[in-house]
Structure formats: C-alpha cells, structure tokens
Amino acid sequence: MVTTTLKVDGMMCGMCESHINDAIRRHFLVRKVKSSKRRGETVIVSEEPLDPEALKRVINETGYELKDIL
C-alpha cells in the first residue's frame, strides 16, 4: 500500500472535506481517503502510486488548491 498526503488550501468545513474525498474517489482507485480542514490535508491510501499531475488537476478542478504532495 502507498500512502500519499496532500496539502490542500481552501477547505473550510466538512462539506469541503467531502468534495475533496469524492473527487479523489471518482478519479483514482483508492483504498481510503480522508481529508482534514483543520490540518489542511488529505491522506490517500492506494495500491499504486498516484500521478502527481493528475492529483493537482483533480484538486484544482474542485476549486481548492493543491500546495504540496508528501
């Protein structure tokens, strides 16, 4: 399993977290995804590494900004 942590700017509430989680689930094969507005991050567990450019595109399309991938 691969754990990918995204630093995401712009999440303000629980619905923001849900928007990010739903977008990730729609575009990638993931085992688990959890976002935290308080920490400004999304943690993804997948079987394979995820494409950084695709992650950036998907997050930015939701109206949030991907700041970093850890």
Image: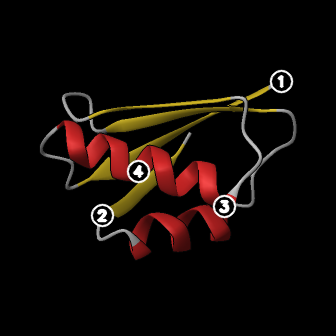
Identify the amino acid type marked 1: Met
Compared with 52, 46 (above or below) is above
Give the mark nearest the N terminus, 1 or 3. Answer: 1
Give the mark nearest the N terminus, 4 or 2. Answer: 4
Q: Which residue is mark 3?
A: 27
**Residue 56, percent from left and from top:** 53, 67
Question: Tag 1: Cα neighbours inside 10 Å, few (<14), some, or many (≥20)?
Answer: few
Relative horizontal placement of residue 6, taking residue 17 as reference (left or right): right
Relative horizontal placement of residue 7, taking residue 11 as reference (left or right): right
Relative horizontal placement of residue 36, taking residue 58 as reference (left or right): left
Q: Which residue is mark 2?
A: 64
Identify the amino acid type marked 3: His
Name the secondary structure under disc 2: loop
Q: Nearer the viewer, mark 4 or mark 2?
A: 4
Question: Tag 4: Cα neighbours inside 10 Å, few (<14), some, or many (≥20)?
Answer: many
Identify the amino acid type marked 2: Tyr
